[in-house]
Amino acid sequence: MSESDSWYIERFELSGSAIGFRVNRKLHEEQSTFQKIEIYETTDWGNLMALDGCIMLTGRDNFLYHEMMSHPVLFTHSNPKRVVVIGGGDCGTLREVLRHREVESAVQVEIDERVTRVSEQFFPELCESNDDPRAQLLFDDGIAYMRNAAAESIDVVIVDSTDPVGPAEGLFNESFYQSCLRALRPGGILVQQSESPLAQVSLIRQMRQLMRQVGFSAVRTLPFPQPAYPTGWWSCTMARKGADLSGFRERGAHSKPFPTRYYSADIHRAALVLPEFVREALGD
Ligand code: SAM
């Protein structure tokens, strides 16, 4: 690393590790009502968004996360018509959800409108589906939204939030999971970003325990690579109401009518197999 280079470094106190991206310049910075929003132009990874110093996405590797937060759950549900995304302000997950023709309504509930406005400016490719007539962008607290949602009104809830601190902390507790269970139709599925299996397997275990405790009948954790996040290895956890999570619509996934760069039916099937240390830690 030459002295003249400048780098954006994120330190992960929890895992005693860090990650850095070489940057050309800072493109934007503001303090919203909820968090500090920074955008950098990197030399090799496209633009980078950080919220309160935590890297949210880079232009180069966000497809891994957005595809794995949307396609496994939507190909697991038998007919996902009404989808709610909690968080997801960069709009990358919403874009993937809307690739599914079965989806009739996709509501995104992001607490901080500034994240979406900044993403529209610096990640326009992630916001290309925001004008889809099926999409509705709400700027509100996802906790309150799910608490007030009509019973048995939603097929899939995707929680694409920041880490369980600050405004996102209440998205990882029993009462939020109770709200989700009530709002989901029978067979409905909650999927939530569940952090790093390498550094936070105890959090994943706690999330799964709470999901089962409130009455979800099945839980499943799917790891996937995500270089820009702590340890470079991330996960999503699904919880289903009144049905199991043993399979998915393989034919539909194989013959999907839209392009992906990471997700496939084979990747989906592989992601259902946990590494031994994770399987043991989760009692899977
Ligand atoms: N992929 C990222 C990750 O795994 O950390 C998340 C991306 S997205 C930018 C995270 C969003 O969650 C942020 O825009 C943040 O404002 C939003 N958020 C946090 N707490 C929320 C809440 N209670 N309701 C709605 N959105 C929330």
Image (spheres, rainbow, N blue to C red):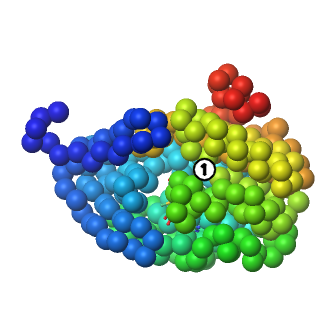
> Mark 1 Cα within 10 Å, few/some/many (few <14, many 20+)?
many
Q: Position of residue 196 (x, y in %)?
A: 55, 39
- Left or right placement of residue 216 versus residue 98 in this view: right
Corner quadrant of residue 142: bottom right
Corner quadrant of residue 175: bottom right
Nearest to the observer: residue 222 or residue 253: 222
Q: Position of residue 6 (x, y in %)?
A: 17, 46
- Left or right placement of residue 188 versus residue 206 in this view: right
Corner quadrant of residue 253: top right
- Asked if residue 283 is positioned above or below residue 219 in the image, the reply reads above
Quarter occupied by the N terminus:
top left
Q: Position of residue 102 (x, y in %)?
A: 73, 62
Report the residue at 66% width, 56% height from top: 172
Quarter occupied by the C terminus:
top right
- Total count of labels: 1
Q: Is mark 1 within 8 Å of ligand 1?
A: yes
- Asked if residue 198 is positioned above or below residue 27 in the image, the reply reads above
Which residue extends farthest left? 4
Nearest to the observer: residue 122 or residue 128: 122
Nearest to the observer: residue 216 or residue 256: 216
Report the residue at 48% width, 48% height from top: 63
- Left or right placement of residue 104 versus residue 114 in this view: right
Report the residue at 10% width, 38% height from top: 3
Report the residue at 81% width, 58% height from top: 188
Q: Give the secondary structure at mark 1.
A: strand
Nearest to the observer: residue 241 or residue 123: 241
- Left or right placement of residue 8 versus residue 17 in this view: left
Q: Position of residue 17 (x, y in %)?
A: 39, 35
Question: Disc 1 marks which amino acid?
Answer: Gln
Residue 219 can be seen in this image: yes
- Asked if residue 229 is positioned above or below residue 35 in the image, the reply reads above
Task: Report which residue position mark 1 lands on.
Answer: 193
